[in-house]
């Protein structure tokens, strides 16, 4: 979608019961996508914030046709899927093991193999699904992102060459946040999503959120330009 039709970001503040309200918002977005297109392509974010939101989504999401949800990941740390740092493990424990999503609908980044091989495999998977729909690139309905205090999002960190990628949808990167070796979506893939939702809880990130909303070029998250962007903040 051309950048000029992108709407300014919405900011929705949930000062109390953040995860409860964020999960309720996401449930509506998932239901809406399934109602409109028959399925919801949902990309999960990593880190710690999503865990409580996932758990609440499990609690309130009994009316979601989970067999019509496809799961992808904004990024993954290059560790085995049962490692404490694995974003997949966090998602499996807090969501994927608790709702009836068919295993074939979960597109895991294999953090346990060579990063470039894992990148190519993940990119090819998304491309194959997109091709079956006649799309040039996989279009997420709801793409969840976190935000670091340095303004990173997914595993797109300040100063990374990956910030300037224009063609590839997924790249292996080395980041300052441990574990360093990661696989991440790039802005071409992120920015063709129908709706990006930033999940940012805690007061420590309020200043960086305002800086990103003001377009501060120091912060990678300032480069997110999807058709619709909503900041779910505490
Ligand atoms: C990762 C994430 C990263 C995360 C932010 C926020 O793999 O680390 O994708 O972008 O979302 O760093 O992390 P918290 O939710 O733990 O604050």
Image (cartoon, rainbow, N blue to C red):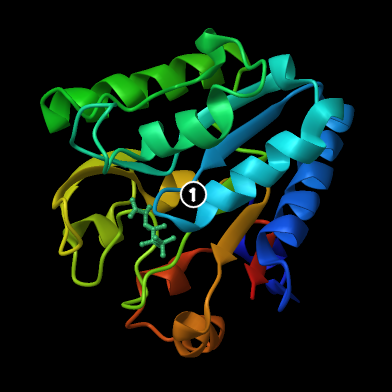
* Picture quadrant of residue 220: bottom left
Residue drawn 84% across the image and 35% down it: 31
Residue drawn 56% across the image and 46% down it: 192
Q: Residue 74: x and y, percent?
A: 43, 44
Please name whichever residue, 27 or 191, is drawn nearer the observer in this view of the structure: 27
Vertical relation: 174 (above or below) 229: above
Q: Is residue 125 left or right of residue 130?
A: left
Residue drawn 24% across the image and 72% down it: 158
Which corner quadrant holds the C terminus?
bottom right
> What residue would you read off at disc 1?
190
Circle 1 — which element?
A: helix
Vertical relation: 218 (above or below) 104: below
Q: Residue 141: x and y, percent?
A: 67, 39
Q: Residue 182: x and y, percent?
A: 21, 44
Residue drawn 54% across the image and 22% down it: 97
* Crowding at mark 1 (Cα within 10 Å: few <14, some 14-19, many 20+): many
Q: Residue 88: x and y, percent?
A: 39, 33
Question: Can residue 161 be spotted in the picture?
Answer: yes
């Amino acid at each position: 979608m051309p950048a000029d039709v992108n709407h300014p970001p919405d900011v929705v503040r949930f000062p109390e019961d953040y995860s409860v309200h964020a999960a309720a918002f996401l449930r509506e977005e998932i239901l809406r996508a399934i109602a409109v297109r028959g399925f919801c392509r949902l990309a999960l974010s990593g880190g710690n914030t999503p865990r409580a939101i996932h758990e609440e989504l499990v609690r309130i999401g009994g009316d979601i046709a989970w067999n019509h949800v496809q799961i992808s990941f904004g990024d993954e740390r290059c560790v085995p899927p049962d490692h404490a740092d694995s974003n997949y493990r966090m998602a499996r424990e807090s969501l994927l093991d608790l709702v009836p999503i068919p295993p074939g609908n979960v597109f895991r980044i294999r953090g346990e193999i060579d990063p470039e091989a894992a990148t190519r495999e993940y990119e090819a998977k998304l491309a194959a699904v997109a091709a079956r729909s006649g799309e040039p690139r996989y279009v997420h309905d709801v793409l969840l992102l976190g935000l670091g205090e340095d303004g990173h999002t997914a595993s797109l960190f300040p100063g990374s060459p990956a910030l300037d990628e224009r063609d590839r949808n997924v790249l292996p990167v080395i980041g300052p946040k441990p574990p360093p070796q990661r696989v991440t979506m790039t802005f071409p893939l992120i920015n063709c999503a129908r709706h990006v939702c930033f999940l940012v809880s805690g007061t420590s990130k309020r200043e960086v959120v305002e800086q990103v909303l003001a377009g501060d070029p120091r912060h990678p998250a300032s480069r997110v330009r999807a058709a619709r962007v909503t900041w779910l903040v505490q």
